[in-house]
């Protein structure tokens, strides 16, 4: 839908006070001015310059009331003015006159600000990021030379994909920079546009566009989860929508630390063929940040970049912080939970959690995620697979090692510990200037103190929790392992 319609409708219907929340004030001015013109209102758009904001805001109201005929005034810095008693008082008193004359006050705010005194009069509108149609117009113009020859459809599509998630001003600046000294952009600029977006998004500190993601082949085990994801991939297409299948929403991975949850969340993007966005919820609350604004922007970017995988790492830590935090923190997480339930089609959320004691019940409610999976310690066969993956990554042929024996000896180790042991063994072989031997791996694995030994209670609690609330990510091989154990070769410890 055209994002300007709700705004135009309110202006045309003579609403006296609109609060437009936007990440791009320049863009919002343009959109509001255009809507005012279409609705037949004269425009006042004072620039505040270095004047104190409250004085300038009050003067703007006075100027509006002095106009003949219907006018609209655009007042910037709404989030500051709505917190100022003088301005709020003046505006409250002036609103009946403003409405009687058919005028309209449009505040431009960077963040939504509560203002109980004006809440009955004010309509808050989120302008959001530009639509595909708007972006296409800008991109096509930049790709068209003075000779009027336009770009091919695939090139426009790729540029559009790179531009999604930028504000209009950001995109205009980026296109201007790339076009410096040239007649037009071409296919070769698409990567630069992607890079510019990656930098802009990273600058916000909360989101990060990943330039590389592992594949499912980089992950040992998790067979049930892998086939589940395969089904989701098929459910992504238009054909599934026509069939009546709702769009996949995402998954929550809960489990033992270092067993590949984050790895799987990242590989989801590769498997679904979508870009990967990492959302660091914990960084919403870093010093000097404006958490509400950051959250709103991050969610808007994710929505604009759809279809996309949004990887929310360690969601439990963020909620632990929220539980101990203030009302503001609780409100912000409330917003996030609501978004999780209602988020736009095309954003596939892959969230991970190590601990369950801080996960709010609302997070687990049906509809937030398609499924919750539990990722346990790897069993013998999965340990073999993980060792093979990391040996292959180091350029070794796994076939040349006694993987079965090594995996049996590596009881209770996590994937991260297995990886670390391979690195240790390589370091020893390198130091002694010889090839890697089974004995190096055996020693390194033997010297690793399993993480679970220190966190036994925590792991037990996690398994207990998962028994009732989650599906197992891996195949259940417990019967097979029990049999091997009876023969003296299996796991010494089990839940
Ligand atoms: P944490 O909660 O501590 O982040 P996690 O469960 O998300 O742990 P990862 O960060 O995905 O674990 O794992 C750390 C590293 O260990 C991975 O980057 C990978 O190299 C290795 N690893 C863990 N599990 C596996 C696995 N199943 N297959 C291959 N490698 C693995």
Image (cartoon, grey):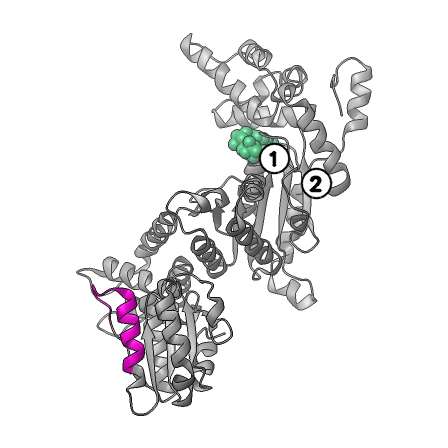
Observer-nearest residue: 52 or 317? 52
Left or right? Give the position of 329 relative to 109.
Answer: right
Residue 258 percent location from the top left of the image? 57, 29
Element assignment for label 1: loop
Residue furthest out toward the left: 181
Observer-nearest residue: 430 or 417? 417
Q: Residue at x 40, y 67 (%)?
A: 153
User: Can residue 144 be seen by looking at this rendering?
Assistant: no
Q: Which mark is residue 491?
A: none
Whether residue 255 is in magenta: the answer is no
| Mark 1 or mark 2: whose residue is earlier in sequence | 2
User: Can residue 115 be seen by looking at this rendering?
Assistant: yes
Q: For the residue with label 1, is its CB less than 8 Å from the closest atom of ligand 1? A: yes
User: Does residue 217 lie above or below 338 as drawn?
Assistant: above
Q: Main secondary structure of the magenta part?
A: helix
Residue that label 2 marks: 224
**Whole-Å distance between the Cαs marked 1 and 2?**
20 Å
Q: Residues within 10 Å of mark 2 (few under 14, many from 20)?
A: some
Q: Which mark is residue 354?
A: 1
- Split into quadrants, the picture shows ligand 1 in the one at top right
Instruction: Give, as a single range, the part of the protein colored magenta.
Output: 47-63
């Amino acid at each position: 839908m055209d994002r300007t319609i709700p705004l135009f409708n309110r202006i045309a219907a003579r609403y006296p006070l609109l609060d437009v929340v936007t990440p791009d004030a320049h863009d919002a001015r343009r959109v509001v001015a255009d809507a005012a013109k279409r609705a037949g209102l004269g425009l006042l758009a004072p620039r505040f310059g270095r004047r104190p904001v409250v004085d300038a805001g009050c003067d703007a109201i006075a100027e509006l009331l002095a106009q003949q005929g219907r006018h609209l005034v655009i007042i910037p810095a709404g989030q500051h003015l709505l917190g100022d008693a003088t301005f709020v008082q003046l505006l409250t008193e002036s609103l009946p006159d403003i409405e009687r004359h058919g005028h309209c006050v449009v505040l431009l705010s960077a963040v939504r600000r509560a203002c109980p005194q004006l809440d009955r009069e004010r309509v808050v509108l989120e302008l959001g990021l530009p639509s595909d149609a708007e972006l296409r117009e800008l991109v096509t113009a930049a790709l068209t030379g003075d000779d009027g020859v336009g770009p091919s459809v695939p090139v426009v599509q790729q540029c559009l994909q790179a531009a999604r998630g930028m504000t209009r001003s950001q995109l205009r600046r980026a296109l201007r920079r790339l076009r410096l000294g040239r007649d037009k952009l071409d296919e070769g600029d698409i990567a630069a546009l992607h890079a510019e977006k990656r930098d802009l998004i990273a600058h916000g500190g909360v989101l990060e566009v990943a330039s590389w993601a592992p594949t499912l082949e980089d992950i040992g085990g998790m067979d049930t989860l892998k086939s589940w994801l395969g089904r989701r991939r098929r459910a992504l297409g238009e054909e599934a929508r026509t069939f009546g299948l709702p769009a996949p929403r995402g998954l929550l991975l809960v489990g033992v630390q270092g067993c590949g949850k984050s790895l799987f969340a990242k590989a989801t993007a590769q498997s679904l063929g979508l870009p990967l966005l990492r959302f660091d919820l914990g960084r919403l609350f870093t010093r000097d940040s404006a958490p509400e604004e950051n959250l709103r922007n991050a969610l808007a970017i994710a929505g604009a970049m759809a279809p996309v995988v949004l990887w929310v790492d360690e969601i439990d830590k963020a909620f632990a912080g929220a539980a101990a935090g203030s009302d503001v923190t609780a409100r912000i997480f409330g917003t996030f939970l609501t978004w999780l339930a209602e988020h736009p089609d095309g954003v596939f959320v892959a969230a991970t959690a190590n601990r369950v004691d801080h996960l709010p019940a609302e997070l687990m409610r049906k509809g937030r995620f398609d499924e919750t999976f539990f990722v346990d310690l790897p069993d013998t066969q999965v340990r073999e697979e993980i060792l093979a993956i990391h040996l292959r990554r180091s350029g070794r042929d796994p076939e040349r090692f006694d993987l079965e024996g090594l995996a049996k000896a590596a009881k209770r180790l996590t994937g991260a510990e297995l990886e670390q042991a391979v690195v240790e063994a390589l370091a020893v072989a390198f130091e002694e200037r010889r090839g890697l031997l089974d004995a190096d791996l055996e020693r390194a694995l033997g010297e690793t103190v399993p993480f679970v030994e220190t966190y036994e209670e925590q792991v037990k609690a996690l398994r207990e929790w998962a028994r009732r609330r989650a599906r197992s990510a891996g195949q259940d091989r417990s019967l097979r392992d029990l049999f091997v154990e009876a023969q003296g070769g299996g796991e010494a410890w089990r839940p």
